[in-house]
Amino acid sequence: MAAVERIVIENCAIATVDADDTEYASGHLVLAGDRIESVGAGPAPAALENVVRRIDADGHLATPGLVNTHHHFYQWLTRGLATDHNLFDWLVALYPTWARLDEDMVRVAAQGSLAMMARGGVTTAMDHHYVYPRGTGDLSGAIIGAARETGVRFTLARGSMDRGESDGGLPPDFAVESLDDALAATEATVREHHDASFGAMTQVAVAPCSPFSVSTELMRDGAELARRLGVRLHTHGSETVEEEKFCHELFGMGPTDYFESTGWLGEDVWMAHCVHMNDSDIAAFARSGTGVAHCPSSNARLAAGIARVPDLLRAGVPVGLGVDGTASNESGELHTELRNALLVNRLGPHRESALTARQALRLGTFGGAQVLGRSRETGSLEPGKLADLVLWRMDTLAHASIADPVAALVLGAAAPVTASFVGGRQIVADGRLLHVDEEAVARATRAEARRLARIADGE
Ligand SMILES: [Zn+2]
């Protein structure tokens, strides 16, 4: 058997995001194969065998790779539309276009979304895909293939919608699947692609879209399916006041009670947004271990409100960060969510004590790994965990005068990514993706966005 190859990184600041928030002003990391072998102060131990590469990371901050916990890749083709709408009006404006998606469009949109995130320090991505127009090919396979090319660790949340307008739902009838088709296709996707092993590159979650686009049967049966298959559950929850009103009118209860009644609270569940929650909703999430994907930019863009992140954290609820789809967060970058999570929450009732810069970094790394069920594997820099990490350049004009590198990363301009590793394999060098041609992806996304717009216009 070949000896394990080591990469030594030295001479950089390190924020480990371990349980004690251990940091080193100048430290080292040793990567051995796909794992972190050691992390600590000063230079790496001498006499290491089989060192294939030594990186002098002077002027850099090393952190765990960023973990995105909520996204809709397909929206890369419909950015910058319906820019002055609330969630329900925005959805109604965009559903007819989204219903015309095909496999080529979905593949290219995934490539664009993944490229944008990966070059900005994301090492674990997810896509909540819930638009499956009939007869449009293998959309899930296309998305998973794009993630594999980019080189990020990936969770596909196989979404679904079966409550069309004629059943009191928000999407038009032609944009939804039948209950049986949605369940069968979701089970097939899990069986074909989900890898439960340590260090898996691809996992699949069961992810009906939202209470206002999914039948109660699909919520219940989806939860049962996920538990039978041993995979996680994801959906949108408590995003807007309109959703709350919808739930009271249709189900006679608020969203959290509805989720509880359909089997949707538990350690194996994470939910996007969770903006409109009262104290008893938060207590129910804490009691059950249900996780939250906090999406501050999207919540602001759609005027949804401010999620109670400080209260969720104090109650012990696992919280990660999400870009959300790029039709409601055009930047598509996760590092900006660190900053926006901190800023948006300081506009809430907790004011300056809402979130610290270090808490924001934790949300974007370890918190994300927690809600994806992967915190034993990734999300912090500790021996034995996967070598998923980023070297952020902190010695340029943008950051050089900020003494605290974590404050510089969270509060400063977007920091250049000198290197990003996933399982010890480098995927970004000097801000450029190593395994994807960014210009080719940009050209293809433009062409597919135009093709979708033409088809949607009925030309
Ligand atoms: Zn979403």
Image (cartoon, rainbow, N blue to C red):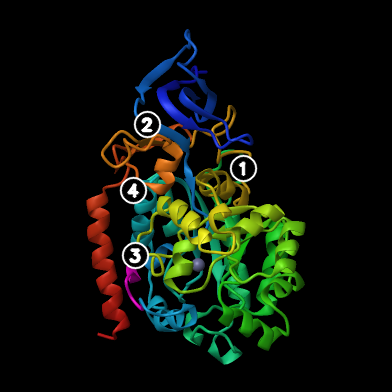
**Circles 2 and 1: CB distance less than 8 Å?**
no
Distance between mark 2 and mark 4 Cα atoms:
15 Å
What amino acid is found at the position of numbered circle 1 in the picture? Ser
- 440 sits to left or right of 154: left
Distance between mark 1 and mark 3 Cα atoms:
34 Å
Q: Secondary structure at mark 1?
A: loop
Decide if ligand 1 comes within 8 Å of the CB at mark 1.
no
Give the foreground label among 2 and 3.
2
| Image coordinates for residue 141, horizontal then vertical, percent | 46, 58
Graded by Cα atoms within 10 Å as few (under 14), some (14 to 19) or many (20 or more), the crowding at tag 2 reads many
Decide if ligand 1 comes within 8 Å of the CB at mark 3.
no
Per the image, the residue denoted by label 2 is 60
Graded by Cα atoms within 10 Å as few (under 14), some (14 to 19) or many (20 or more), the crowding at tag 1 reads some
Per the image, the residue denoted by label 1 is 375
Question: Which residue reaches farthest bottom?
Answer: 166
Graded by Cα atoms within 10 Å as few (under 14), some (14 to 19) or many (20 or more), the crowding at tag 4 reads few
What amino acid is found at the position of numbered circle 3 in the picture? Asp
- 112 sits to left or right of 205: left
Per the image, the residue denoted by label 4 is 413
What amino acid is found at the position of numbered circle 4 in the picture? Ala
Residue at horizontal 53 percent and vertical 84 percent from the top: 170
| Image coordinates for residue 59, horizontal then vertical, percent | 34, 29
Per the image, the residue denoted by label 3 is 104
Does 32 sit above or below residue 443? above
Residue at horizontal 49 percent and vertical 56 percent from the top: 341
What amino acid is found at the position of numbered circle 2 in the picture? His
Magenta residues, as a range?
Answer: 76-82
Give the foreground label among 3 and 4.
4
